Amino acid sequence: MPSTPIAFGTDGWRGRIGREVTFDAVFRVVDAMAAWTVDPANPDPGDPWTLAFVHDTRFLSPELSEESADRLAARGFRVLLADGPVPTPCASWHVKSRGLRGASR
């Protein structure tokens, strides 16, 4: 069964929870993010083995973030997991201020 394309906009993933944004689709993005961040050809500065995971107030957002963080922690990544909703600009500031290569929301 072919994978459904994932659409990103200027402020992140565009889709409806339970339709386009599913656990399987989130794991596809998390796996791609993990591969990109540790790729030796990646020119971005920052710690490739530490990633931040945040969530917003939408349905299942905390659970999607936690499952994603667990998935990467099991692969040896150091995961910074927010304990409450975080706006995108705050997540971006956190990545920059901590010298990380990325975060997921």
Image: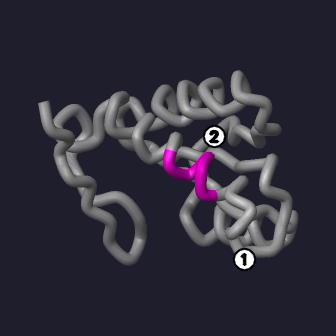
Left or right of 4 in this view: 67 = right
Left or right of 47 in this view: 17 = left
71, 104: nearer the viewer: 71
Residue 41 point in image, percent of width and height: 69, 69
Residue type, label 1: Pro
Reply above or below: 13 against 58: below
What is the residue that sits farthest to the front in this orientation?
41
Per the rendered image, the range of residues in magenta is 32-36
Kindly identify the residue that appears in the image at 60 percent across and 71 percent down: 89
Residue type, label 2: Gly
Kindly identify the residue that appears in the image at 44 percent across and 47 percent down: 29
Dot 1 surroundings within 10 Å: few (below 14), some, or many (20 or more)?
few
Observer-side mark, 2 or 1, equals 1
Q: Pointers 2 and 1 in contact (CB under 8 A)?
A: no
Q: Quadrant of residue 88?
A: bottom right
Identify the colour scheme used.
Answer: one colour
The residue at which mark 1 appears reads as 43
Residue 20 point in image, percent of width and height: 21, 43
The residue at which mark 2 appears reads as 84
How many marks the image carries: the answer is 2
Residue 59 point in image, percent of width and height: 35, 34
**Label 2 – label 1 distance at C-alpha:** 31 Å
Who comes first in sequence, dot 2 or dot 1? Answer: 1
41, 48: nearer the viewer: 41
34, 82: nearer the viewer: 34
Dot 2 surroundings within 10 Å: few (below 14), some, or many (20 or more)?
few
Reply above or below: 18 against 53: above
Left or right of 88 in this view: 21 = left
Left or right of 84 in this view: 79 = right
